[in-house]
Image (tube, rainbow, N blue to C red):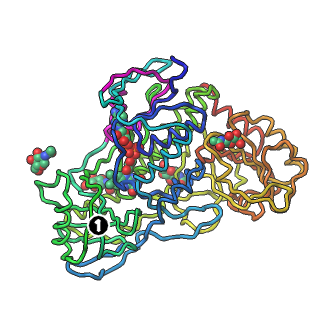
């Protein structure tokens, strides 16, 4: 293989592919990312970015740029009767809650997918990587040590050029119609509903308040507008109940405007242009494996959900976080190739769960609208699951929970967000903590755990104060495999940390939020190992536990 050939080919430059490229590049792996389209996609599409995804972006170091191009989700839906200008009722879609040190981003954001992808590409560019547009994967061949990809490129004169290139690994993030998935003979199991929903983005110059979602339902035709977070005039619309003949064609702006007037009786609303118009048929499908040899699937290529609940894009990003660090360890020869099997071991169960509840929501919303019924107000009450804070990999073969020293469990699926400090459990998200300062310094700036975690390295968090702990901690640090993990000693409030020189990072938990949020005692050693994807890989009471965790992770006989 030529030395300058990138190690990984990423096929498809949607959010899943872009995020994976960023993670791999941060891990020092060269990538090539191609997309068959000749221009970037338009449309606000997957605009709801869930709290857990925001946290992952914080760990990846790109969150602030994304928040800059989005806005907090607007929580209220206004419902109207035909002909009325004033809403009949307001329904709360979500509760907006206050951030806490362990949960700094408790609310979903709206970020138009166009802007979201542009921010991801700008970060790729900083790492000297550009999306190669007009390059389509046609087919691939696998060998024990490489993957051969046949790509049809468009050269600078606009001519098609066939190219054959070799890579160590190939990841298909090529969306629901994935060519990669077909090439590796993986089935896309599930159903496509015989339902058509017209949707798109439209500018509304006047007559619809951008502070709310708006809904007209209860007859054969229904329309919902949701502010799309681009500006106060830009809305995404969902329209069900077009005529049979038209239902599978792309709606035009004129049809939408005329039908809107008919459905709502509103002549006062002034529309502008419609930058994106589309026709959607619910597809509810997933694969039963996400890896065949050196080829992986992530994002919509591996699963697609009803767009109710806004999980699709988010789940794809979570796939990329799960796969990225594992591929990096294996590629760099630090873990056996069998570690890669834990990618679909961990993800498939989470995706199956997600698919079930987004389908339930779908049944409660679009199915009813299609039948000409009003949506039940309760179908807007979507519960904590959607925030993805309770995503867990319990039962995974690389997770280790050895101590009961930690009180309670961090079950965010059932724990109401904002209900107070969590505690920590292996296989769940590692909470954030703030107000951490360099031990022994009077006035150094404070930091947070999310800015310490990163996508390349495990963080071994050491909790515990006394002299006994200090001695043990030196031993622990000495045995942490170098290059894949680093130790962070979190001293209780008021401790200065004498004799801690062997620890790379010693921080005082000045506001108590780390001990509080993790539920760890101060007088006893507790070790929490946080994976590069922000998941607690292990909670252990001693050095042996640390050794067991890493030995299991890198061993060859999983
Ligand atoms: C109207 C709508 C609303 C949605 N709302 C939400 C929401 O609120 N929240 C949410 O999380 N999700 C939502 N989604 C889903 C979300 O948009 C998708 O889940 C997301 O785009 C999937 O990202 P991806 O990177 O996996 O794939 P995609 O974004 O589909 O990207 C795949 C890319 O691969 C390229 N490609 C395909 N084949 C090839 C090939 N052979 N060679 C090279 N390139 C190829 C394509 O051109 C495409 O750019 C919504 C979707 C729609 C349509
Ligand atoms: C992640 O943290 C480790 C340990 O401090 C550091 O060596 C590495 O450069 C960091 N990686 C990134 C991408 O910030
Ligand atoms: C669209 O639907 C009509 C009738 O429902 C059908 O005759 C036609 O073949 C469909 N077109 C496509 C492209 O599926
Ligand atoms: C872990 O996630 C699964 C879904 O993958 C869910 O069924 C289960 O309840 C979660 N575990 C806990 C303790 O919340
Ligand atoms: C949703 O409705 C379909 C029928 O339209 C039914 O077959 C399916 O079991 C329902 N799924 C869920 C999760 O409620």
Q: Residues within 10 Å of mark 1 (few under 14, many from 20)?
A: some
| Residue 179 locus on image (x, y percent) | 33, 32
| Residue 163 locus on image (x, y percent) | 37, 22
Is 331 positioned to the left or the right of 223 in the image?
Answer: right
Q: Residue at x 62, y 28 (%)?
A: 335
Q: Residue at x 22, y 71 (%)?
A: 218
Residue 101 in view in this figure? yes
Q: Which residues are magenta?
A: 160-189
Quadrant that contains the C terminus? top right
- In this rendered view, identify the residue nearer to me: 132 or 363: 132
Is 189 positioned to the left or the right of 165 in the image?
Answer: left
**Residue that numbered label 1 is attached to:** 224
Residue at the far front in the pictured view: 157
Q: Residue at x 27, y 77 (%)?
A: 80
**Residue 107 shown in magenta:** no
The count of marks equals 1
**Residue 178 shown in magenta:** yes
| Picture quadrant of residue 39 | top left
Is 241 positioned to the left or the right of 412 in the image?
Answer: left
- In this rendered view, identify the residue nearer to me: 349 or 100: 100
| Picture quadrant of residue 228 | bottom left
Q: In the image, is the residue at mark 1 within 8 Å of ligand 1 by its beta carbon? A: no
Q: Judge whether 85 appears above or below 367 on screen.
A: below
């Amino acid at each position: 293989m030529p030395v300058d050939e990138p190690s990984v080919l990423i096929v498809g430059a949607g959010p899943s592919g872009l995020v994976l490229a960023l993670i791999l590049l941060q891990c020092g792996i060269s990538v090539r990312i191609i997309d068959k389209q000749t221009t970037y996609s338009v449309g606000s599409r997957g605009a709801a970015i869930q709290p857990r995804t925001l946290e992952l972006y914080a760990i990846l170091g790109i969150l602030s740029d994304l928040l800059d191009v989005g806005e907090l989700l607007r929580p209220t839906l206004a419902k109207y009767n035909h002909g009325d200008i004033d809403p009949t009722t307001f329904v709360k879609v979500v509760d907006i809650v206050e951030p806490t040190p362990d949960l700094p981003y408790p609310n979903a954001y709206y970020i138009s997918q166009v802007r979201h992808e542009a921010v991801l590409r700008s970060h790729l560019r900083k790492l000297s990587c550009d999306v190669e547009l007009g390059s389509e994967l046609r087919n691939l061949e696998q060998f024990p040590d490489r993957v051969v990809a046949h790509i049809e490129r468009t050269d600078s004169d606009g001519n098609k050029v066939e190219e054959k290139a070799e890579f160590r690994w190939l990841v298909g993030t090529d969306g629901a119609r994935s060519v990669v998935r077909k090439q590796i003979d993986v089935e896309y199991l599930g159903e496509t509903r015989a339902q058509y929903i017209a949707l798109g983005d439209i500018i509304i110059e006047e007559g619809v308040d951008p502070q709310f979602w708006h809904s007209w339902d209860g007859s054969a035709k229904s329309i919902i507008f949701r502010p799309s977070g681009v500006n106060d005039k830009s809305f995404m619309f969902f329209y069900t109940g077009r005529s049979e003949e038209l239902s599978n064609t792309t709606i035009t702006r004129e049809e939408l405007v005329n039908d809107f007037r008919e459905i709502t009786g509103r002549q006062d609303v002034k529309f502008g242009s419609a930058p994106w118009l589309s026709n959607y048929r619910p597809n509810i499908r997933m694969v039963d494996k996400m890896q065949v040899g050196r080829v992986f699937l992530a994002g919509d290529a591996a699963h697609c959900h009803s767009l109710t609940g806004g999980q699709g894009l988010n789940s794809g990003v979570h796939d990329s976080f799960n796969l990225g660090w594992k591929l990096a360890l294996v590629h760099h020869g630090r873990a056996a190739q069998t570690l890669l099997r834990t990618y679909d071991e961990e993800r498939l169960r989470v995706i199956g769960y997600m698919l079930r509840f987004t389908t339930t929501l779908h049944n409660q919303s679009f199915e009813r609208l299609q039948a000409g019924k009003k949506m039940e107000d309760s179908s807007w009450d979507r519960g904590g699951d959607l925030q993805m804070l309770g995503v867990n990999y319990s039962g995974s073969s690389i997770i280790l929970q050895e101590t009961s020293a930690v009180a309670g469990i961090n079950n965010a699926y059932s724990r109401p967000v904002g209900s107070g400090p969590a505690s920590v459990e292996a296989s769940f998200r590692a909470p954030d903590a703030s107000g951490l300062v360099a031990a022994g310094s009077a006035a150094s700036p404070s930091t947070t755990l999310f800015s310490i975690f990163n996508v390349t390295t495990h963080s071994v968090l050491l909790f515990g104060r006394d002299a006994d702990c200090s001695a043990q901690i030196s031993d622990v640090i000495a045995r942490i495999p170098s290059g894949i993990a680093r130790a962070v000693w979190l001293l209780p409030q008021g401790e200065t940390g004498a004799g801690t020189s062997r620890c790379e990072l010693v921080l005082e938990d000045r506001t108590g939020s780390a001990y509080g949020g993790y539920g760890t005692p101060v007088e006893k050693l507790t070790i929490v190992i946080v994976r590069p994807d922000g998941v607690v890989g292990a909670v252990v009471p001693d050095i042996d536990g640390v050794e067991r965790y890493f030995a299991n992770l890198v061993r060859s006989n999983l």
